[in-house]
Amino acid sequence: MEIIEFDNKYRKETIDLLIDVAVIEYGFPEWKDELLQFKNEFFKNNGGNCWIAIEDDTVIGTISLRKMSDDCGEVKNLYILKEKRGASTVGQDLLNTLFDYAKQVGYSKLRLDTYKQFERAIRFYEKNGFKLIDSTDIHFFYEKDLNNN
């Protein structure tokens, strides 16, 4: 497995993964139009980037970072192929890549929001130092201080 900066060569495969996980598996059909418009330029032009995990020339995971403020980035689009969750290090490797990049560009904290359906992801984020800062019945908001790994 290899983590690379997003490459347009894998655009269709990346979008297919995003839609398979978010729209079909977890039931967010309202996200489909936005996911179909996925472009790394959006993240790069907004103080961030996107990475994909490749195995046997197949996209098995993705993660993105976008700027929220001069010192804060937002984690987006952490999706892993169902067959690769848990038993591999794909998610951790993607998140570590994002952490390293965020520090390099000067972010001191990261934020993310997630939903109740993503129970496994919530445990993963908390294990990686994200602290719950706000929530509703179904929506959770997290923050991580990058200065305190």
Image (cartoon, rainbow, N blue to C red):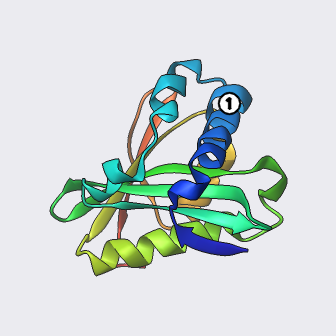
Q: Is residue 145 visible?
A: yes
Residue 62 image offset from top left, x and y in percent: 58, 56
Q: Looking at the image, is 85 positioned above or below residue 139?
A: below
Residue 140 image offset from top left, x and y in percent: 46, 38
Which kind of residue does numbered mark 1 sit on? Tyr
Left or right, 33 with reference to 84: left
Which residue is the extreme one toward the left? 70
Residue 146 image offset from top left, x and y in percent: 34, 73
Q: Looking at the image, is 56 positioned above or below residue 79?
A: below
Q: Residue at x 76, y 67 (%)?
A: 55
Q: Residue at x 49, y 24 (%)?
A: 33
Q: Residue at x 59, y 41 (%)?
A: 15
Q: Residue at x 59, y 24 (%)?
A: 28
Left or right, 90 with reference to 4: right
Q: Looking at the image, is 127 positioned above or below residue 103?
A: above
Tag 1 residue = 26
Decide which of 50, 28 is in the foreground and name it: 50
Q: Is residue 137 visible?
A: no
| Element at label 1 | loop
- In this rendering, the count of numbered labels is 1
The answer to which quarter of the image holds residue 149 is: bottom left
Q: Residues within 10 Å of mark 1 (few under 14, many from 20)?
A: few
